[in-house]
């Protein structure tokens, strides 16, 4: 049942991220809820779960968008899920500052991976312009949104755990 709930959450996040949120976003910054979900699940459930959520949701995102290289988001989100998952045993799960800091740093890493892969494939990108105009403000935006997403995922996981044990 947990797999179905996660599939529904990822689908809803992807639909919102691509349809509604672009019209409500400040300064044209569209938050990557898939990355925030990957980060949250990695911090809560460990590296295997973080990698699984990151790869699966990133691949679905690549497939659904059709505007880039298939697999580049899967790779970047998989690395983000792995890094968060590696921190899982070293963080206090109730601390909402951890996902905020992780979201800031991992958004930078995520976008750097995207840039390096696309640059290696021959895309002409202006790194400094993109970093200052998009990546840095998005990192701050993600740092503000991550505690909310993390808290929702944390509560959902606790509910599912309690329901399973009852």
Image (cartoon, rainbow, N blue to C red):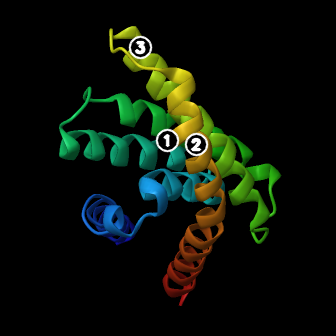
Q: State the separation of the CA atoms marked 1 and 3.
A: 24 Å
Crowding around mark 3 (Cα neighbors within 10 Å: few <14, some 14 to 19, many 20+) is some
Q: Report which residue position mark 2 lands on.
A: 107
* Mark 1 in CB contact with mark 3 (< 8 angstroms): no
Residue at the disc numbered 1? 51
Cβ atoms under marks 2 and 3 closer than 8 Å:
no
Q: Is residue 162 left or right of residue 25?
A: right
Question: Mark 1 Cα within 10 Å, few/some/many (few <14, many 20+)?
Answer: many
Residue sitting at x 56%, y 32% = 131
Q: Which residue is mark 3?
A: 119
Work out whether residue 82 can be spotted.
no
Residue 113, relative to residue 36: is it above or below?
Answer: above
The image quadrant of residue 122 is top left
Q: Nearer the viewer, mark 1 or mark 3?
A: 3
110 up-or-down from 104: above or below: above
The foreground one among 31 and 70 is: 31
Which residue is rendered at x = 51% and y = 50% of the image? 49
Is residue 144 in view? yes
Q: Residues within 10 Å of mark 2 (few under 14, many from 20)?
A: many
Q: Earlier in the sequence, mark 2 or mark 3?
A: 2
Q: Residue at x 79, y 68 (%)?
A: 95
Q: Position of residue 154 (x, y in %)?
A: 60, 73
Report helix, strand or loop for mark 1.
Answer: helix
Label 1, label 2: how far apart the Cα atoms are? 16 Å
């Amino acid at each position: 049942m947990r797999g179905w709930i996660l599939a529904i959450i990822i689908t809803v996040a992807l639909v919102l991220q691509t349809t509604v949120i672009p019209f409500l976003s400040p300064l044209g910054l569209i938050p990557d809820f898939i990355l925030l979900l990957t980060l949250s699940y990695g911090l809560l459930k460990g590296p295997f779960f973080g990698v699984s959520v990151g790869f699966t949701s990133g691949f679905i995102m690549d497939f659904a968008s059709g505007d880039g290289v298939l697999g580049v988001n899967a790779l970047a989100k998989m690395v983000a899920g792995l890094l968060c998952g590696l921190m899982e045993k070293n963080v206090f799960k109730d601390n909402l500052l951890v996902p905020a800091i992780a979201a800031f740093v991992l958004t930078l890493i995520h976008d750097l991976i995207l840039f390096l892969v696309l640059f290696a494939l021959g895309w002409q990108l202006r790194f400094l312009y993109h970093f200052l105009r998009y990546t840095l403000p998005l990192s701050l935006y993600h740092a503000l949104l991550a505690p909310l997403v993390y808290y929702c995922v944390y509560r959902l996981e606790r509910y599912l755990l309690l329901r399973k044990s009852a």
